[in-house]
Every structure is written in C-alpha cells, then in structure tokens.
Image (spheres, helix red, strand yellow):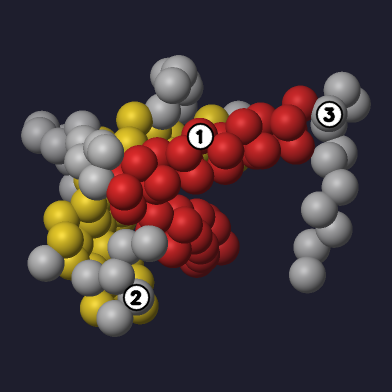
Amino acid sequence: MKDPRDRSPDGTELRQALQDLSTVERWAERVASGVQSHPYTAPESWEGPQLSVETRTENGMHTVAGIVTWPPGDGAGPAVLDESERAVLRSLVRSLLDLAGHESGTARTRVVLTPLGPRVAACWLDAE
C-alpha cells in the first residue's frame, strides 16, 4: 500500500483529495435517496487533456470497456496511455462507481489529466 501522506509543501494535495471525495459522497447519497438523478459534475473546471472512461457494471463489478479522448468528434479516438496510466484511471473510476453504489448498467466518466493528477469532471450513470 502506498504511503498516504501528503507530500505537497502546504498540504494542498491531501486537502483537495478529501474535498473531491466529500463532494462525490454527497452526490452519491443524493442519487441513492432519489433526491437527485442528474450526473455528477465537478464544482470547478480543470485544465488538461480530457478522457471519457466507458464502463459496464454487473452485480457491482465494474469493467472498463474503453478509454477515449474527450470531446468526441474530429480527432477523437482511443486514448494513448501507458499501462500504469490506464491502471490509475481504472482504479479512479471503479472507486467512484463503488462510492456511488452503482450495481448494474453502463457509466461514462469524464476525467481531466491535471498536473496534480487525474480529476473526475463528470459522471453519467445508466442503471439497468
């Protein structure tokens, strides 16, 4: 297991991660209670390349079906990533879907590759 200590000089990395997690947890609670059905959207925008991670979930098991560049259209296609980058994205998206309690269906998660690491910008859940 990696050492979870924040290595940023002013503690911003850990603080940002905890704020992101808290925001996603509140969204997941509203979706689970039926209060909110619209997609998760990050409270701020980030600069960096964007990717769409497409997943399929059955019985709570999330399978990444593809990772493509965002936005779709001219020049869009499969993202060129090495295996370690793909592993980080798979882990991030699966953790988000677990946290949201997504048990079955498809999902599209938009991730921004920021200088501080990948950030979830939006997530659309299509439950079956």
Assess disc 2: are there few (<14), some (14-19) or many (≥20) residues with their C-alpha within 10 Å of its C-alpha: some
Q: Nearer the viewer, mark 3 or mark 2?
A: 2
Q: Tell me: 17 left or right of 96.
A: right
Q: Secondary structure at mark 3?
A: loop
Which quarter of the rendered picture does the C terminus lie within? bottom left
Q: Is residue 65 visible?
A: no
Image mark for residue 23: 1
Q: CA distance from mark 1 to mark 2?
A: 22 Å
Which kind of residue does numbered mark 3 sit on? Answer: Gly
Q: Marks 3/2: CA distance?
A: 34 Å
Label 1 with label 3: CB-CB less than 8 Å = no
Q: Compared with residue 127, is residue 45 higher up or lower down, i.e. above or below?
A: above
Please tell me which of labels 3 and 2 falls first in the chain: 3
Q: Residues within 10 Å of mark 3 (few under 14, many from 20)?
A: few
Tell me which residue sits at (57%, 42%) in the image.
Answer: 21
Question: Which residue does the numbered mark 2 point to in the structure image?
Answer: 60
Circles 1 and 2: CB atoms closer than 8 Å: no
Judged from the image, the secondary structure of the residue bearing numbered disc 1 is helix
User: Which amino acid, mark 2?
Assistant: Gly
Characterize the local packing of mark 1: few (<14), some (14-19) or many (20 or more) Cα atoms within 10 angstroms: some
Which mark is drawn over residue 32? none
